[in-house]
Amino acid sequence: MQPPRAFRLEVTSKAHISLLAVVVVWAGSFSVIKELLDEGMAAGDIAILRYAIAAPGFAYILWRAKGLPGLTRSDATRVAVAGILIVVGYHVFLNVGTRHTTAGVAALVVALAPAMTLVLAFAMALERVRMRHVVGLAVAFVGVAVVVAYGTGESLSLASAKGPLLVLAAPLAFALYNVIMKPLLGRYDLLALTAATSLVGIVGLVPLVRASTVDTVVDASAGQVGWLLYLGVLATLMGYILWSVGLRGIGPTRAVTYTYAISPLAVTIGAVVLDEPVTIWLAFGAALVVAGIATAQGTTLGLAERVKSAAGFGQRPADGNEIAGP
């Protein structure tokens, strides 16, 4: 029995609004991270505090789902490794790298996450290589090379490339996370699985806690508290929940079109809010990255889209699509 048309329209409208909100929040997160770094906050402390803020929400999600029933020792190992990769690896490298580059450049480098996932999938024979994959990936990687070499308007040097190269480890960690999570998809509730990996990842951040972390909490200004709440509540917790709502409402093929706006919007926000330079080369590189990823992903749902259902935090494997939230 088909649901009433009015109901379907309501679900679709809610999905579009949710996805639009996620795109804006995640695009703005790159500038928020850069602002906190420029104000002297340590890269590790930003990751620690944003996840400390999000932790109660993830714990509640896992509790509501009654955990991960039937979790085997092998699956638990995957959850642990994936959690370290996505929370410690992804966020620490993103933050450390962003200190040495602009928010816009960081966003464009992170946009390579779907491409890197596809490359790993090809290497492990988990995805069949097609010509559109080869062309799309080549274009995307050339785009990032253009961004790294000429995007900021500075002459290419070890100093100018340091930040983007450090950030590059973030989408790599994300791609590894995707591949490790693949065997778990469909066997567990995805929202609960994501909550579990996030909570495990938070434990991985504990060794990074220093005296300065406590000082950061005590001495934080009202503005810094607001930015940390933005990252913890909006970007880390609500962003992934709203992304799930959007996917379930309109499906991955239509939802993915929203993701292509994240990096260009992040560049725009960085230019407006942080006065970051937007060069012709940066715009050209951004266009190549977005076009390349769109071409490589196409309209079919392969591994890169399915595994990111977990990385998208909460989607079912048949409804997932690849998106890297900052």
Image: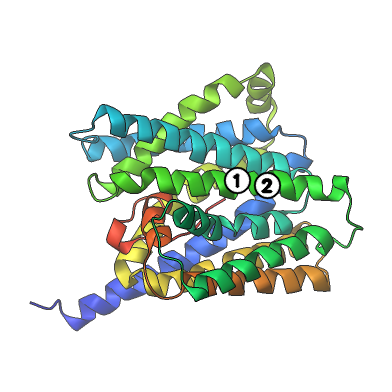
**Residue drawn at the location 69% of the way across and 35% of the way down:** 221
Q: Residue at x 46, y 58 (%)?
A: 122
Q: What separation in Å lies between label 2 and label 1 (alpha carbons)? A: 5 Å
Q: Can residue 261 be seen in this snapshot?
A: no
Question: Label 2 amino acid?
Answer: Val
Of the residues shown, which amino acid type is indicated by label 1? Ala
Residue under numbered circle 2: 167
Q: Is residue 153 above or below residue 59?
A: below
Q: Residues within 10 Å of mark 1 (few under 14, many from 20)?
A: many
> Of 53 and 110, which appears nearest the observer?
110
Residue 136 spot, x, y in % from top left: 57, 71
Please indicate whether residue 122 sits to the left or right of residue 283 in the image. left
Q: Position of residue 82 (x, y in %)?
A: 43, 38
Callout 2 environment at 10 Å: few (<14), some (14 to 19), or many (20+)? many
Is residue 298 rendered to the left or right of residue 48? Answer: left
Label 1: which residue? 170
SS for callout 2: helix
Identify which residue is drawn at 38% across, 54% down. Answer: 307
Q: Residue furthest top?
A: 211
Q: Nearer the viewer, residue 139 or 50?
A: 139
Q: Are marks 2 and 1 in contact (CB under 8 Å)?
A: yes
Left or right? Give the position of 42 relative to 260. Answer: right
Please say whether residue 155 is visible from this viewpoint. yes
